[in-house]
């Protein structure tokens, strides 16, 4: 059998890109822990209201919804950190959760604020690119 019908792929693996992917993924996780804190614990406080541009009345009337949203951000952070802790065996877990964050960022930009694409989607995209290249 000859190699003529086979496809060959070239894999370029860089230890520094791999480490950068882990670092960015960890930063995305910490960003989501920050979102959790804002949405679950600081939503009605000045810091939370300022971050989301809410009046005291708006914050009070939406605090249960925000706490639920914060919990989901916590799950994203947990998944990302789980993938980081697993190292090489966590590659697919990191990719899955980075894609989840990216989709959430795109959806948030389309439905709530374009700013979400940059705050949430861009870091996830960078993490995804570095993770897949590293």
Image: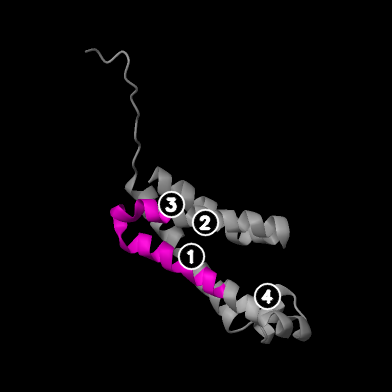
**Sequence-earlier tag: 4 or 2:** 4
Is residue 52 within the magenta segment? no
Q: From the viewer's perspective, is 88 left or right of 120?
A: left
Question: Element at badge 3?
Answer: helix
Q: CA distance from mark 1 to mark 3?
A: 12 Å
Label 1 neighbourhood size at 10 Å, few (<14), some (14-19), many (20+)? many
Q: Please tell me the numbered disc located at residue 100.
A: 2
- State the mark number for residue 51: 4
Q: Image quarter for residue 10?
A: top left
Upstream in the sequence, badge 1 or badge 3? 1
Q: Report if the CB atoms under discs 2 and 3 are less than 8 Å apart.
A: no
Estimate the x, y position of residue 85 in percent, counting from the top left.
32, 63
> Which is the main secondary structure of the residues drawn in magenta?
helix
| Quarter where residue 93 is shown | bottom left
Foreground mark, 4 or 3, reads 3
Q: Nearer the viewer, residue 35 or 76?
A: 76
Kindly report the distance in space between the C-alpha atoms of the residues bearing marks 2 and 1. Answer: 8 Å
Q: Position of residue 25 (x, y in %)?
A: 44, 59
């Amino acid at each position: 059998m000859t190699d003529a019908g086979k496809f060959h792929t070239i894999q370029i693996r860089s230890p520094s890109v791999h480490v950068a992917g882990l670092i960015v993924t960890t930063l995305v996780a910490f960003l989501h822990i920050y979102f959790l804190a804002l949405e679950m614990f600081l939503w009605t406080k000045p810091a939370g209201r300022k971050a989301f541009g809410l009046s005291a009345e708006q914050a009070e009337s939406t605090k249960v919804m925000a706490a639920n949203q914060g919990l989901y951000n916590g799950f994203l952070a947990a998944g990302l950190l789980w993938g980081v802790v697993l190292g090489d065996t966590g590659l697919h877990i990191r990719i899955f959760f980075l894609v989840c964050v990216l989709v959430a960022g795109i959806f948030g930009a389309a439905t709530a604020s374009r700013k979400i694409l940059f705050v949430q989607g861009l870091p996830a995209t960078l993490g995804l690119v570095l993770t897949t290249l590293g």
